């Protein structure tokens, strides 16, 4: 039986290649539902139907309206990746102004395994709020895959979004 994974992506470089992340998760046996931040959805707007066809599910990028039914199956695990510095710090501060933050911030307190793998440069990582946000998420039970256990921040203007370690995050989720 296939497990349901919510793959939640922010407007960070590897999201240009989110289809690679979806395929990697599918190859690992997950039924993938994709949720994008509004900015990430704008990147894929001309090609959104490709993602719908790839996943077999609607792609969400906004909260549903009160009269709308949820069209996604219940998640058994969630992976927020790539997670931008903005999303990390909002989530760490308890601000869930997008569905991409709101869903995992609630799910982790409902017993759903949630992992998050950032993608940002070393200058952004040096901001004091980053360490505080990682600690705050960790205290809540989010598996933050940062550094040697996940993604190691790259020097400014030197990241390679095509080399994002999707498999490392998926392997970690497989142990939940």
Image (tube, grey):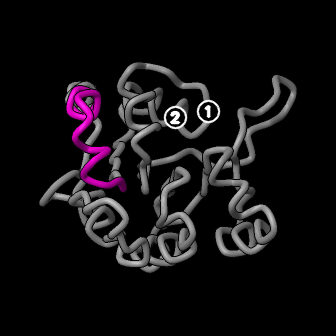
Question: Quick one: which residue is furthest to the top in this view?
Answer: 94
Q: Within 10 angstroms of label 2, few (less than 14), some, or many (20 or more) residues?
A: many
Q: Residue at x 60, y 57 (%)?
A: 33
Query: Regarding mark 1 in the picture, which secondary structure is present there?
Result: loop
The secondary element bearing badge 2 is classed as: helix
Quadrant for residue 168, please give it: bottom left
Q: Main secondary structure of the magenta part?
A: helix
Magenta stretch?
119-134
Q: Name the residue at 30% across, 62% down.
A: 169
Q: For marks 2 and 1, give the CA distance.
A: 5 Å
Graded by Cα atoms within 10 Å as few (under 14), some (14 to 19) or many (20 or more), the crowding at tag 1 reads some
* Viewer-nearest residue: 80 or 82: 82
* Residue 71, numbered circle: none
* Residue 61 image position (x, y, % from top left): 69, 45
Figure check: 117 above or below 53: above
Q: On the image, numbered disc 1 is attached to which residue?
A: 98
Residue 50 screen position, x and y as percent: 74, 74
Q: Residue 151 lies in magenta, yes or no?
A: no
Q: Is residue 48 left or right of 98 when viewed as pictured? A: right
Q: Name the residue rendered at 47%, 71% in the picture.
A: 21
| Looking at the image, residue 65 lies above or below residue 3 | above
Q: Mark 2 highlights which residue?
A: 101
Residue 58: percent from left, percent from top: 75, 56
Residue 142's spot in the image, x, y percent? 29, 37
Where is 83 relative to 24, above or below? above
Q: Is residue 145 left or right of residue 75?
A: left
Q: Nearer the viewer, residue 51 or 119?
A: 119
Marks 2/1 in contact by CB < 8 Å: the verdict is: yes
């Amino acid at each position: 039986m296939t497990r349901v994974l919510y793959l939640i992506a922010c407007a960070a470089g590897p999201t240009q290649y989110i289809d690679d992340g979806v395929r990697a998760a599918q190859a690992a046996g997950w039924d993938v539902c994709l949720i994008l931040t509004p900015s990430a959805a704008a990147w894929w707007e001309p090609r959104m139907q490709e993602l719908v066809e790839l996943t077999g599910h609607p792609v969400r990028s906004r909260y549903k309206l009160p009269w709308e039914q949820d069209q996604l199956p219940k998640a058994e695990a969630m992976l927020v990746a790539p997670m931008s510095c903005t999303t990390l710090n909002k989530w760490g501060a308890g601000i869930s102004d997008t569905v991409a933050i709101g869903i995992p911030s609630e799910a982790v307190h409902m017993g759903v395994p949630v992992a998050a793998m950032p993608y940002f440069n070393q200058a952004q990582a040096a901001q004091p709020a980053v360490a505080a946000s990682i600690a705050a998420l960790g205290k809540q039970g989010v598996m933050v895959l940062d550094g040697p256990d996940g993604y190691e921040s790259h020097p400014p203007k030197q990241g390679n979004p095509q080399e994002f370690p999707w498999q490392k995050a998926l392997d970690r989720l497989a142990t939940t």
